[in-house]
Amino acid sequence: MPSVSRAAVVVRSRGDVSTALERVRAVAERSGVELLFDGDGAPDIALVLGGDGTMLRGLARFLERSVPVLGVNFGRVGFLTAIDGDDLEMGLERVFAGEYKVVELPTLEVEHRGGRHVAVNDVVVTRGELGRLIELRYAIGEEDLGVQACDGLICATPQGSTAYNLSNGGPVLVWGLDALVVTFVAPHTLHARPLVVSRGVDVVLENRSIDVPAAVLVDGHRVDGLGCGESVTVHLAPEHSRLAILPEETFFTRYGHVFGPGHNGR
């Protein structure tokens, strides 16, 4: 990759990152890189200081601008980050010199009531009241698959498959797959199994519960409600997020580092 001349900086909203910012400024000054903090200008790369939540915010923020996003982990897990906080100086010197690669990752589009949202990680339709099951009718590729009582349903991208999807027993999708995974949350059956769905196929979810509202979450944030008889459509979006990582890193090195023996899951 070409060397970096301008880098946008995104920091986590919680916790003090002032020391980390001073370290970034020092590396940028030595490397002749201009740092952008206000979102203006055209950066060559975006630097995220935080964990996976801050990475999601950065990937979504620069999605339409096709700017690669690289994370320095100051969170708990940091599966999407490329550099550990302790290695900030050495890692950023390499990145500013052009020593990084970009992985193109699919995103999800959810359509409801004429509106549109794009998710980097996942779209979840979940119960709107604690302690109550909801009944979801689901169809994939225009084929009705029936009604399932559950706590909710997850549609996840490959990068999102290691988050809420994984904790609910869904499969991990390797980076590079152009697909999404559909996984029920606590289904009231022995037969509901996760499904992997290809590009161009719609997943339609309808709330069939008469007295239990549902909520639509995009990357963990509620964007809408879903009353009885209302539905949402989820499919792979035309946009791709651009994740920057170090040249020697792969999906499997990240996966082993985060989920291997002696490490806590995401």
Image (spheres, grey):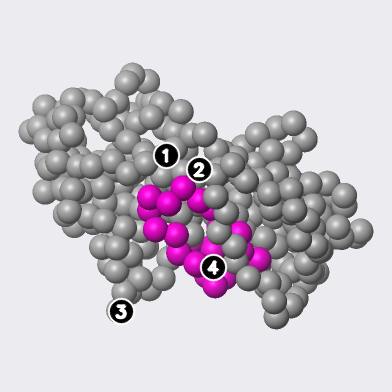
Between discs 4 and 2, the one toward the N terminus: 2
Q: Pick the residue in front: 2 or 95.
A: 2
Category of crowding for the residue at label 1, using alpha-carbon neighbours closer than 10 angstroms: few (below 14), some (14–19), many (at least 20)? many
Between discs 1 and 3, the one toward the N terminus: 1
Secondary structure at numbered mark 2: strand
Instruction: Please tell me which residue is depicted at 70% across the width and 32% down the height of the picture.
Output: 115
Q: Which residue is mark 4?
A: 170
Q: Which residue is mark 3?
A: 261
Magenta stretch: includes residue 22: no
Q: Quadrant of the N terminus?
A: top left
Measuring from the top left, give residue 2's x and y in whole percent.
16, 29
Q: Which residue is mark 1?
A: 241
Secondary structure at numbered mark 4: loop
Looking at this rendering, what residue extends furthest in the left direction?
Answer: 30
Residue stretch in magenta: 163-184
The nearer-to-camera label among 1 and 3 is: 1
Under mark 2, the amino acid is Thr
